[in-house]
Image: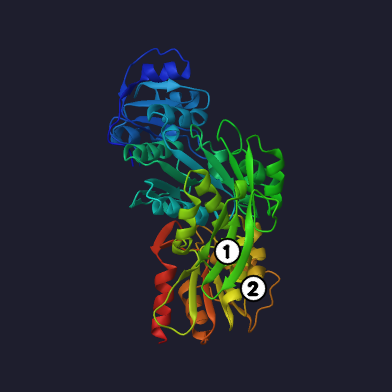
């Protein structure tokens, strides 16, 4: 996704921007990317060093895709030789975001940009904020786990936070199409890998921090440090932080930028609840904000964790200029994103839900929310993804058993790992029997859960949410939890 109106740049222009002397061959380029699959004819290929292979080894594919020049490091330049005009820098990943921002005219500076980080709640909070903008007739953009949207048009995304060249191009497309606001999820991987270098946010938000991605970060402290790097003056103007989370409270004390606090539990926070009343269809709420602002209405979302998401989205919407009275009038219209406590209803007498929960904390929160609205049994089906943080697997298994009346442990996206090995880790310490069973085949696990459901029960299928594939041994097979759950119900009705 790129803007239509692009001004070509020369390697000499780029060298001057980087403070380098340009010697040798000249070339003009009309775009840039570090991925040969995203290269367009006339592009600059950014050849990055990788954990296993240097990007420069894909130079033949880059030339075939139409690359006209290369930016790389010294090692990459030795591989490329004189195949294409080349600019050499010490660390191309560190400068790629700044180069992309320069090339596309600093698009983040041309709209009101909000970046949301945290382990859980990023997608829902961003989705809710984008709805509040649309309801107030603001043309807006969204970038996150569920894809990219510009106004009413949607596009797929490979990562929660795209690589910096793709990110800057997407935001430039939004500016070209007159978007005034942008909300995007910012993953910890993206921060560490400099994917948001060159971006600048009007406001950033922190939802919470719980165990996840320790295979990448190594420790919770490193994970926290990655998230906290978003809260500095080079990246953002203002921060919104949920201080109910212990890491959020810590961040609020150490943030390098002005902050506003958000809390479901403390009335000392800048934004908090005056009133929360559970109803059959959600919550009746009163939100108190900066300067005594009062926003009241009904929210038709399930789960106390969604109160956190609504509160953060409302605070950010007001900060961006949305009228509080307009927000009050529209609260009841808010809907959750795909795959987040999404209902599957084909007329059955029990509640069937699909949710993306894939961390211990998310599983606990979602099951607690479901228990709150279920008069009968809660039947939960969950797997853990392969090639990801293995340390959370037994914790997730235990959370599933603790939060349900029947727990069905199954496969998620095993990727290159053995499904049996993943399930062994998930079920470690769990007493299998009437209340906890293992079924490796995900369709079979869904069938078991549905067969046990009676009127008044809830069946909740966790882990994959909006995803439409199951990855096994590097092959992605079609698999949509919502479709599979509907089919299983249909077979029994």
Rendering coords of residue 444 (x, y %): 48, 77
Tell whether 63 sits left or right of 91.
left
Distance CA(mark 2)–CA(mark 1): 26 Å
Q: Quadrant of the N terminus?
A: top left
Q: Which quarter of the figure has residue 182?
A: top left
Depth check, front residue: 453 or 262 = 262
Q: Is residue 184 above or below residue 233?
A: below
Sort mark 2 into few (<14), some (14-19) or many (20+) by Cα contacts within 10 Å: many
Q: Which quarter of the figure has residue 370?
A: bottom right
Q: Is residue 399 above or below residue 67?
A: below
Element under disc 1: strand
Q: Quadrant of the C terminus?
A: bottom left
The disc at residue 285 is 1
Tell whether 175 sits left or right of 420.
left
Q: How is the image coloured?
A: rainbow
Q: Is residue 381 above or below residue 106?
A: below
Tell whether 349 sits left or right of 3.
right
Q: Which residue is mark 2?
A: 403
Residue at 60 percent of width and 41 percent of height: 239
Residue 272 appears in the figure = yes
Q: Earlier in the sequence, mark 2 or mark 1?
A: 1
Sort mark 1 into few (<14), some (14-19) or many (20+) by Cα contacts within 10 Å: many
Element under disc 2: helix
Residue 219 appears in the figure = no
Rendering coords of residue 39 (x, y %): 34, 37
């Amino acid at each position: 996704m790129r803007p239509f109106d692009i001004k070509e740049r020369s390697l000499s222009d780029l060298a001057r921007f980087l403070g380098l002397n340009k010697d040798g061959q000249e070339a003009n380029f009309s775009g840039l990317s570090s991925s040969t699959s995203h290269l367009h004819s006339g592009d600059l290929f950014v050849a990055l060093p990788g954990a296993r292979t240097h990007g420069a080894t894909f130079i033949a594919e880059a030339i075939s895709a139409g690359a006209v020049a290369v930016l790389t490091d010294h090692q990459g330049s030795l591989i490329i030789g004189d195949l294409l005009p080349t600019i050499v820098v010490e660390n191309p990943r560190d400068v790629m975001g700044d180069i992309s921002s320069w090339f596309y005219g600093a698009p983040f500076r041309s709209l009101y940009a909000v970046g949301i980080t945290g382990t859980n709640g990023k997608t829902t909070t961003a989705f809710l904020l984008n709805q509040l903008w649309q309801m107030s007739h603001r043309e807006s953009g969204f970038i996150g786990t569920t894809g990219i949207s510009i106004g009413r048009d949607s596009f797929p995304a490979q990562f929660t936070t795209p690589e910096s060249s793709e990110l800057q191009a997407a935001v430039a497309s939004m500016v070209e199409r007159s978007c005034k606001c942008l909300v995007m999820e910012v993953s910890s991987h993206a921060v560490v890998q400099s994917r948001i270098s060159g971006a600048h946010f009007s406001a950033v938000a922190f939802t919470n921090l719980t165990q996840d991605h320790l295979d990448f970060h190594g420790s919770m402290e490193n994970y926290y440090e990655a998230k906290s790097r978003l809260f500095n003056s080079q990246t953002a103007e203002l921060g919104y932080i949920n201080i109910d989370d212990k890491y959020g409270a810590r961040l609020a004390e150490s943030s390098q930028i002005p902050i506003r606090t958000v809390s479901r539990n403390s009335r000392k926070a800048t934004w908090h609840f005056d009133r929360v009343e559970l109803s059959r269809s959600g919550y009746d709420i009163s939100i108190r904000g900066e300067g005594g602002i009062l926003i009241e209405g009904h929210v038709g979302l399930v789960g106390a964790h969604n109160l956190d998401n609504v509160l953060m989205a409302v605070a950010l919407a007001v900060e961006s200029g949305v009228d509080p009275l307009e927000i009050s009038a529209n609260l009841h219209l808010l809907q959750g994103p795909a795959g987040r406590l999404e209902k599957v209803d084909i007329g059955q007498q029990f509640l069937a839900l699909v949710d993306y929960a894939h961390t211990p904390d998310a599983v606990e929160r979602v099951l607690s929310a479901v228990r709150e609205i279920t008069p009968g049994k809660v039947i939960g089906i969950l797997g853990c993804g392969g090639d990801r943080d293995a340390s959370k697997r037994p914790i997730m298994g235990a959370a599933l058993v603790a939060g349900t009346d029947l727990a069905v442990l199954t496969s998620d996206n095993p990727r290159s790992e053995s499904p049996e090995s993943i399930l062994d880790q998930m079920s470690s310490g769990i007493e299998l029997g009437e209340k906890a069973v293992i079924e490796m085949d995900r369709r079979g696990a869904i069938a078991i859960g549905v067969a046990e459901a009676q009127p008044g029960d809830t069946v909740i299928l966790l882990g994959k949410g909006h995803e439409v594939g199951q990855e096994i041994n590097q092959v992605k097979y079609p698999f949509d939890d919502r479709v599979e759950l509907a089919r299983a119900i249909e077979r029994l009705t």
